[in-house]
Amino acid sequence: MTRLVVGAALVDDLERPRVLLAARRSAPPALAGRWELPGGKVEPGEEPRAALHRELREELGVAVRLGEEVLAPQPGGWPLGGDLVMRVWWALVTEGEPACLADHDRLLRLELGSWGGVDWLPGDVPLVAAMQELAVSAR
């Protein structure tokens, strides 16, 4: 059975993104030191967008406005390996300042053109490349 993970592409502008927030994992040990989009697993019975709002409050202490979903090349979401797939939405912080509250030890704001410049978790690599192409084409 497939397990759903949700993630946020936290950017400075939903229409013409130029800056993307990356979060460095602090746990578990196998993932520590690698970068990801913030988010997490959808709980049973939870709606994906509601799960993303919850995860961003828990992990970063922020409220967001969600934009369009970053559609995966196949139905169901972006494959993360094993039984995990991820759905991702563009998001804009509307309340709070992102902080490392859980699961991360560092946040980094990446300028457009350098979004791929950190050691992303393997499942995030094609997603970040696709997002950068979308952002460049929106210019």
Image (tube, grey):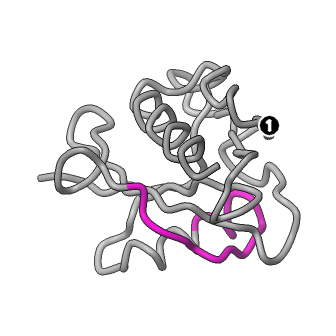
- The image quadrant of residue 34 is top right
As helix, strand or loop, the secondary structure at mark 1 comes to: strand
Count of numbered tags: 1
Q: Is residue 55 above or below residue 121?
A: below
Residue sitting at 30 percent across and 73 percent down?
Answer: 44
In the foreground, 33 or 136: 136
Q: Residues within 10 Å of mark 1 (few under 14, many from 20)?
A: few
Residue 69 in magenta stretch: yes
Residue sitting at 68 percent across and 29 percent down?
Answer: 113
Q: In the shown orientation, is residue 105 left or right of residue 68?
A: right
Residue 30 in magenta stretch: no
Residue 71: percent from the left, percent from the top?
A: 34, 55
Residue sitting at 66 percent across and 21 percent down?
Answer: 118
> Magenta residues, as a range?
55-70
Instruction: Determine which residue is flagged by label 1.
Output: 108
Residue 119: percent from the left, percent from the top?
A: 61, 19
In the foreground, 22 or 132: 132
Q: Is residue 50 above or below residue 15?
A: below
- The image quadrant of residue 23 is top right
**Furthest residue in direction left, as rendered:** 1
In the foreground, 100 or 23: 23
Residue 98: percent from the left, percent from the top?
A: 82, 57
Q: Amino acid at mark 1?
A: Leu
Residue sitting at 58 percent across and 45 percent down?
Answer: 37
